[in-house]
Amino acid sequence: MNLIKREMADYRVLLRNVPSLVVMLFVVSVIMMNLLANKELFSVKYLALDCGFTLSWISFLCMDMICKRFGPKAAAKISILALATNLFFCLILKLLSLTPGNWGEFYSTGLPEVNSALNTTFGGCWYVVVGSSTAMLVSAICNSALNHAIAKRLTISGFKAFAIRSYVSTGIAQFVDNLIFALIVSHTFFGWTWVQVLLCSVTGAVMELLCEVIFSPIGYKVSQDWEKEKVGNQYLEYASKNSVTA
């Protein structure tokens, strides 16, 4: 019980310290990934990608920024918050998809199938929600732990250090995320072959990593500004004083 109270108190202090814009981007990217995972980006014989891949790099970049300034436990906690928020909105969308009203697109087409299709898409199939939630949770913990472990062993600093810890942890964690989702959803329910699952996981991780490489200088600059402006000092002092690993 004391552990739960201590962790909840730590959560409250953390949420008051992590910049709201980063948390917002993190949460929105997770919600949008869940929706876009319902649509294929492209599919060929040995390779298939869903549209969720186009946004997943945002959440990992946010994680890396938070991990650098606030530590791996803080990054994991914000990830759990994003996941919980995503599940809450999935529930809301599911309930609203059960209402009898028509979607706007129905009035431009007159086809009842449009309502059925949109209700299914926005209501979310249970296996897509389960797959994306499981993949997000495991990959977030993997990314934060690897990022911190690599940082502890680096003897350099600056952007080069940030890049090494971010690119390695993101590449591995993205592969884990893609693989888990593909196994739970794409292989089981969409009929993807094992070759497609593995190629999708690798290719998706490479594409997402390239996006992070492009935008990582911005992430590094922002995290450096946090340090210079002493953003999060309250949380770091609280964590140190209460023996919460930051």
Image (spheres, rainbow, N blue to C red):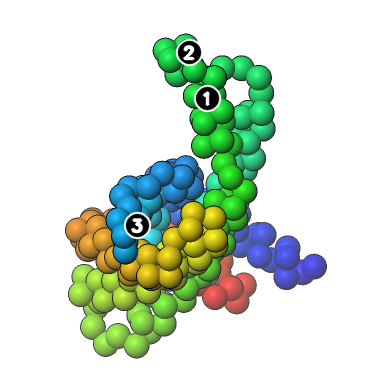
The Cα–Cα distance between marks 1 and 2, rounded to whole angstroms, is 9 Å
Q: Nearer the viewer, residue 234 or 42?
A: 42
Marks 2 and 1: in contact by CB < 8 Å?
no
Question: Does any portion of residue 139 appear in the rendered image?
Answer: yes
Q: Residue at x 37, y 70 (%)?
A: 195
The Cα–Cα distance between marks 3 and 1, rounded to whole angstroms, is 26 Å
Q: Residue at x 36, y 82 (%)?
A: 150
Q: Amino acid at mark 3?
A: Ala
Mark 2 lies on a secondary structure that is loop
Q: Amino acid at mark 2?
A: Gly
Per the rendering, the mark at residue 48 is 3
Q: Nearer the viewer, residue 178 or 221?
A: 178
Image spot of residue 171 (x, y percent): 33, 71
* Sequence order check, earlier mark of 3 and 1: 3
Q: Nearer the viewer, residue 23 or 90?
A: 90
Mark 3 lies on a secondary structure that is strand
Q: Amino acid at mark 1?
A: Glu
Q: Which residue is the extreme one toward the right?
A: 1
Residue 243 appears left or right of 196:
right
Q: How many labels, in total? A: 3
Image spot of residue 74 (x, y percent): 51, 65
Residue placed under numbered mark 2 in the picture: 110
* Sequence order check, earlier mark of 2 and 3: 3
Q: Residue at x 21, y 70 (%)?
A: 159
In the picture shown, does residue 166 fall above or below 156?
above
Residue placed under numbered mark 1 in the picture: 113
